[in-house]
Amino acid sequence: MQPKRIILELGAGNDLHGGDYTKAAIRAVQDALHHSSMTWIRAFGVDSKQMQVDVTIGVQQPDKVDTDKVKATLPHGIVTVKAVKGGLDVPDPERGDIAVIASAAVSVRMALPQQKPA
């Protein structure tokens, strides 16, 4: 059976000093994850290792996100992470610093068992 998207969670994260895009991305993913309580995994006896977890991170400089570090923070599933242009950089010209704001979309897909008609 074709996997279906069963969850889409969104999150935002930042690194207020130092311009660390990976730190902001990880915080955005954690924000998204903390919006979900997937009790259905235990309730239906689903193998969480079979979930397909697709993460998209939006930051102004996607090439500065260590996607392997972001991936390592996800506790379940077959995880893919990609970084794309998005988010927001807020420069502090007085201090030569930058605040990085990242957005994250975490999508979970699974092949669901067919229900028998009642």
Image: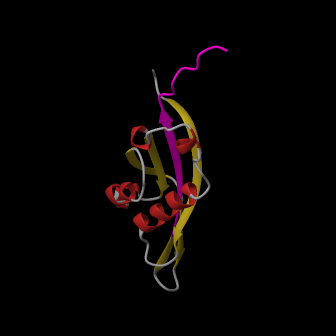
* Extreme residue in the right direction: 118
The residue at 40%/38% (across/down) is 50
Residue 115 pos. (x, y %): 58, 20
User: Would residue 61 be counted in the magenta stretch?
Assistant: no
Residue 37 pos. (x, y %): 60, 52
The residue at 48%/38% (across/down) is 46
The residue at 36%/58% (across/down) is 72
User: Would residue 109 be counted in the magenta stretch?
Assistant: yes
Quarter of the figure with the N terminus: top left
Left or right of 71 in this view: 103: right
Where residue 40 sits, quadrant-wise, is top right
Quarter of the figure with the C terminus: top right
Relative vertical location of residue 108 with respect to residue 31 in this rendering, above or below = above
2 or 89, which lies in front? 2
* Extreme residue in the top direction: 117
- The residue segment tinted magenta is 100-118
Residue 62 pos. (x, y %): 40, 55
Residue 27 pos. (x, y %): 50, 65
Tally the marks.
0
* Extreme residue in the bottom direction: 95
The residue at 47%/58% (across/down) is 60
53 or 64, which lies in front? 53
Q: How is the image coloured?
A: secondary structure
12 or 43, which lies in front? 43
